[in-house]
Amino acid sequence: MSRTVFSRVRIAVLVVGVSLLSAHLGVAPATAAPKEDPFLGVTPNWDKKISGASRFTVLADFNNEAVRDNETGLVWERSPSSLVTGWVDAITVCLRREVAGRKGWHLPMIEQLSSLVDTTGAGALPSGNPFQNISTTFPYWSATTSTFNQANAWGVEFNSNGNLAVFPKPSGEAVWCVRGGQSFDGNTP
């Protein structure tokens, strides 16, 4: 083997070795641009109060059909179904829900659903929210069963006052699905 070929092989080995060592040590090459974290500042710990338009982000990865609540980290359907159904069927609707090709939706706990209520504003939802087709006629089911009467479940009325109330499980109420967080209170239908 000639000296030139031998030198080129040593240089190639040296370059590969440096690359592997850099990768092992977590050192990015000088030409790599830092990646922006799309969830920077979003926490599921509910430790923030975010007001106005910055509270919600319409998610392009979900064809603008889902909204991230930057205060809670939960992802909501942007436009819930207009379906009115009983509680057991509402659970099934969310389990089968597919938004922008993504499954993993569930009926929210009462704490999650009520986190959307703004008690300081004129309406039940925070001003500047991007949600569409929210029912003010029918309350939305939660997955939370009433502790006083197992035949009832909690729901939220998104009319002008945002009341939390219990409803008989067979009654017809609206369905609004969510991703993330706890999905059930342990009381099965």
Image (spheres, rainbow, N blue to C red):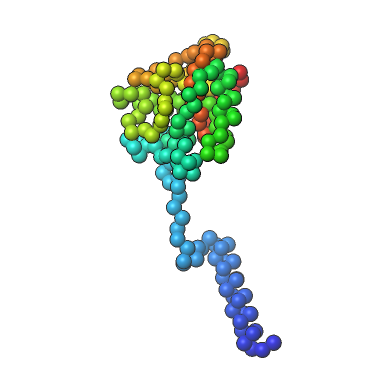
Q: Image quadrant of residue 91?
A: top right
In the drawing, does residue 123 fall left or right of residue 8?
Answer: left
Q: Quadrant of the N terminus?
A: bottom right
Q: Looking at the picture, does residue 120 appear above or below residue 172?
A: below
User: Is residue 142 visible from the viewing direction of this image?
Assistant: no
Visible residue check, residue 177: yes
On the rendered structure, is 179 left or right of 137? right
Residue 67 at what x, y percent from top left?
44, 36
State the residue lying farthest toward the bottom.
2
Residue 153 position in % (x across, y down): 52, 16
- The residue lying at 48 percent from left, 14 percent from top is 166
In which image quadrant can residue 48 be found? top left
Residue 112 location in percent, x, y?
47, 27
Figure disc tally: 0
Residue occupying the point 45% across, 26% down: 113
Residue at 56% of width from left, 39% of height from top?
101
User: Where the C terminus falls, by quadrant?
Assistant: top right
Residue lying at the far right in this picture: please name it.
Answer: 1
Task: Judge by depth and name the residue closer to the eye, 183 or 177.
Answer: 177
Query: Which residue is found at the position 57% from the left and 68% from the top?
Result: 19
| Residue 184 spot, x, y in % from top left | 56, 25
Relative vertical location of residue 9 with respect to residue 16 in this rendering, above or below? below
